[in-house]
């Protein structure tokens, strides 16, 4: 009996030391992702570069077709990555270095997490997987002014300057220089500070990303007063104008034949004390998906480069000046009476006399469906009237800020250069002059040197 008890005691002790609960092995580890409305396992798997089966297995998902928004799931296969992950669009001015500082997450890990192999992949509007942490994320930016030091500025914020220096990968506090964004964390007791953006600015944004062939792009900057801007988008010099105190807007057209893919956005912001900040970033150009028009047969002279090239040069000269005053206000109106009927839309690819589809239609064609009257769509100043080879009898109106409208194929021109026109004012009569297949009005809008889809200006007020 005593021998038996010794065996039982030995077995019990052995089992205590060797026992490992099954649930300890079953508890998966790894970064989490909060399911967003519209997410599917396929979308999530593609986003993180993992398999659907692995997500199902590690999270023990019984019904893959039922996901709840707000539910957190573990993302497998991301060794060394912890915390909650989210997909965010890259803001203007951000790059891997600044995102690394802002999220306090190593650049190498960001690159690995997003499978980034080139800096060009981190373009404005691109979706990146980023860690979310209320404890470590730096949500505010400090812009030092001329003569300021990090020690003084941190003291005003009641922050430790050495902590801020380390968070921004600076060995010494004196390495922080004016115009360089310095990130810091915000306590709940802090007054509200602007979110991360560029020096001198509280916000900088495109009205939509990606940008699209043949469309108008509006770029809005908000920040300090009396700032000066210069820059380029897709090779076009930008012109910013103040629209309110501390708010500046640039309008830029995107060529309808521009190559899709990445293009460069450059910006220089200068304060009255001559301190400036420069940055450049890639943005994505998306196709406008313009179809091909049926081939047209026209007078050969109207497609002869010997005649069309001088016409293009004349028009380019007419629409190049950028007037400092905005003459229009609100929506543009149609330049014809109702009922309105369009014969050809903007951007469609064109072939003439059996040639290739190498050009596009640069405006909106109105047929004769009410009467022959042509009206000014907005206030402006007439800057050109006269005959052209392709456009026939043409008129161009300057609306200010680099915005022009053109009217082609007129039978009569009812205005002259220098005239100020108001919306709805009669300016011409529809005809069939120039390169036509029948009577119609060709109406085009130029935005800072590029023709754009006029429909945008009929549906939305700029700026």
Image: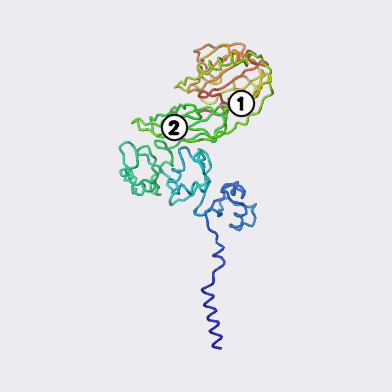
Residue 158 horizontal/vertical position (percent) = 33, 47
Could you tell me if residue 341 is visible in this image? no
In-front residue for pair 363/8 = 8
**Separation of marks 2 and 1 at Cα, in angstroms:** 29 Å
Image quadrant in which the N terminus is located? bottom right
Which numbered circle lies on residue 405?
Answer: none
Residue 430 horizontal/vertical position (percent) = 63, 14
Q: Secondary structure at mark 2?
A: strand
Instruction: Give the left or right position of residue 191, taking residue 258 as reference.
Output: left
Q: Which residue is mark 1?
A: 347
> Which residue shows up at 69% across the image and 23% down it?
294
Instruction: Give the left or right position of residue 79, taking residue 172 as reference.
Output: right
Q: Secondary structure at mark 1?
A: loop
Could you tell me if residue 252 is visible in this image? yes
Residue 275 horizontal/vertical position (percent) = 35, 33
Is 47 rendered above or below residue 15?
above
Label count reads 2
Which numbered circle lies on residue 267?
Answer: 2
Residue 252 horizontal/vertical position (percent) = 51, 27
Graded by Cα atoms within 10 Å as few (under 14), some (14 to 19) or many (20 or more), the crowding at tag 2 reads some
Q: Residue furthest front?
A: 117
């Amino acid at each position: 009996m005593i021998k038996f008890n010794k065996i039982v005691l030995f077995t019990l002790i052995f089992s205590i030391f060797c026992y490992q609960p099954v649930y300890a092995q079953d508890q998966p580890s790894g970064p989490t992702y909060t399911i967003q409305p519209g997410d599917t396992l396929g979308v999530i798997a593609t986003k993180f570069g993992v398999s659907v089966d692995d997500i199902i297995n590690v999270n023990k998902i019984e019904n893959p077709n039922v996901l709840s928004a707000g539910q957190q799931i573990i993302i497998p296969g991301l060794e060394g990555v912890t915390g909650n992950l989210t997909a965010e669009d890259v803001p203007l001015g951000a790059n891997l270095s600044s995102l690394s500082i802002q999220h306090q997450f190593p650049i190498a890990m960001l690159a690995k997490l997003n499978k980034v192999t080139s800096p060009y992949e981190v373009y404005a509007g691109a979706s990146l997987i980023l860690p979310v942490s209320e404890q470590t994320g730096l949500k505010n930016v400090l812009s030092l002014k001329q003569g300021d030091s990090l020690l003084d500025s941190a003291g005003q914020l009641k922050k430790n300057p050495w902590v801020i220096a380390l968070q921004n990968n600076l060995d010494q506090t004196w390495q922080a220089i004016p115009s360089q964004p310095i990130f810091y964390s915000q306590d709940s007791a802090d007054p509200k500070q602007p979110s991360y953006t560029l020096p001198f600015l509280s916000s900088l944004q495109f009205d939509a990303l990606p940008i699209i062939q043949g469309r108008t792009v509006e770029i809005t900057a908000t920040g300090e007063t009396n700032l000066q801007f210069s820059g380029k988008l897709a090779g076009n010099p930008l012109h910013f104008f103040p629209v309110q105190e501390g708010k500046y807007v640039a309008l830029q057209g995107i060529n309808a034949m521009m190559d899709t893919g990445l293009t460069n956005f450059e910006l220089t912001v200068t304060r009255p004390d001559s301190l400036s900040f420069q940055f450049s970033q890639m943005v994505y150009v998306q196709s406008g998906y313009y179809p091909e028009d049926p081939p047209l047969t026209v007078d050969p002279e109207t497609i002869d480069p010997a005649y069309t090239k001088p016409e293009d040069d004349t028009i380019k000269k007419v629409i190049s000046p950028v007037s400092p005053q905005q003459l229009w206000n609100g929506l543009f109106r149609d330049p014809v009476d109702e009922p309105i009927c369009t014969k050809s839309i903007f951007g469609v690819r064109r072939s003439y006399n059996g040639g290739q589809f190498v050009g596009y239609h640069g405006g909106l064609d109105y047929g004769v469906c009410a009467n022959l009257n042509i009206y000014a769509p907005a206030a402006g100043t007439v800057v050109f009237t006269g005959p052209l080879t392709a456009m026939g009898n043409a008129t161009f109106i300057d609306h200010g800020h680099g915005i022009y409208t053109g009217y082609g194929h007129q039978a009569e021109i009812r205005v002259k250069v220098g005239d100020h026109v108001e919306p709805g004012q009669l300016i011409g009569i529809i005809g069939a002059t120039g390169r036509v297949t029948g009577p119609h009005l060709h109406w085009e809008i130029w935005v800072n040197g590029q023709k754009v889809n006029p429909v945008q200006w009929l549906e939305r007020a700029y700026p």
